[in-house]
Image (cartoon, grey):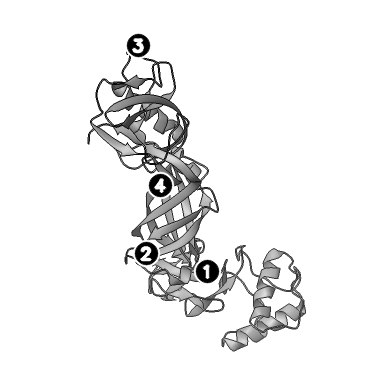
Amino acid sequence: MAAATAVLAVVAGSLALTRLGSGEETGGAKNTGLPPATAPVERGDLRDSAQADGTLGYDKQRKVNAGAAGTITWAPRTGSTVKRNERLYEIDGRPVRLMYGAGPMYRTLKPGDKGRDVEQLERNLAELGYTGFTPDEEYTELTSAAVKRWQKSHDVKQTGKVGPQDVTFAPGKVRIKSVGAGVGEQAQPGAPVLETTGSERIVTFRLDVAESRLAKAGTKVTVDLPDGTTASGKVSSVGRTAKPGDDPQDDSPKVTLTVSFDEPDEVDGFDQSPVTVNLTGETRRDVLTVPVNALLALPGGGFGLQVVRGGTTREVKVELGMFAEGRVEVSGGGLREGAKVGVPKI
């Protein structure tokens, strides 16, 4: 929780503990009785941390639209992985193969065409060993010759042209999330036939806006997985828009964050499994801390502590630092590690 929120909560909760109108000067000895309980002043590291419920999934979700009209004659199995040059689906017995690239395959490429989609195709052909041209934005007769060799290797008509009925581009290998049109169903150009994701495991989770400062891009996290193991990772993206939460009891604005794993291939678990994300923000090292509920709101302003020694107590004014883990960093007032401070009885 943000420090400002914690301070407000402390003020509300501690006013009842403050002996207003006592007439005694802060720092003076008090013999008006001992507090109901005490807690030690501790020295150590204080970490600003939080936990959030997340969902284990896959990156780069997208839809694959049919590149031609016809009957679906083959579709991949849900959960399977498709790599470069492998079948993604078939229409009328004609395979549509996966190639890697950021842009879509939106036209039939032929000699004389120019554009980034041409370069995408040529780089894929070169990666597959069909060379004899310079990968650039111009589709030449040399490109066409390489395409014919690629078509021959797949036992299809050697036209030297490539279109959406032959190839679909994706940023990398894909995992089949769902099949929108099964074998025997009709496909129409532009209509979804598959829903895919990337093959890399990720976690998505939501945080209150007040806590989102703990999870900037690059923040290190650990994730408690469904099988009881823990995996390390980092926040890879932070949403720019805050939206109300889904819980009717907590509709405070939240932002959506994504975690990428340090070793994604080692992460196992069913898609959409619930996980716990552990975030650690700022760390204050070798500081004095007390339980938050030990704080007193002083009559003259600021905060103090009721220090207990032997059978006497005294109030000392302190400066506050970071709030975290139910404790608060304190300084001043002659505090030392091991001193006892008053707290409400639990």
Gap in angstroms between the C-alphas marked 3 and 4: 41 Å
Mark 3 closeness class: few <14, some 14–19, many ≥20 residues within 10 Å: few
Rendering quarter of residue 120: bottom right
**Sequence order check, earlier mark of 1 and 2:** 1
Q: Is residue 9 above or below residue 52?
A: above
Is 196 in front, or is 309? 309
Q: Which mark is residue 139?
A: none
Foreground disc of the pair 3, 1: 3
Rendering quarter of residue 326: top left
Q: Is residue 19 above or below residue 322?
A: above
The image quadrant where one finds the C terminus is top left
Q: Is residue 196 above or below residue 214?
A: below
Say which element carries label 2. Answer: loop
Q: Which residue is mark 3?
A: 23
Q: Which residue is mark 4?
A: 50
Residue at 38% from the left image edge and 39% from the top image edge: 41
Q: Which residue is mark 2?
A: 271
**Sequence order check, earlier mark of 2 and 3:** 3
Foreground disc of the pair 1, 4: 4
Residue 136 is situated, as x and y percent measured from the top left of the image, at 75, 70
Q: Which residue is mark 1?
A: 68
Gap in angstroms between the C-alphas marked 1 and 4: 50 Å
Residue 87 is situated, as x and y percent measured from the top left of the image, at 50, 78
Q: Amino acid at mark 2?
A: Asp
Gap in angstroms between the C-alphas marked 2 and 4: 24 Å
Is 265 in front, or is 88? 265
Foreground disc of the pair 2, 4: 4
Q: Is residue 199 visible?
A: no
**Sequence order check, earlier mark of 2 and 4:** 4
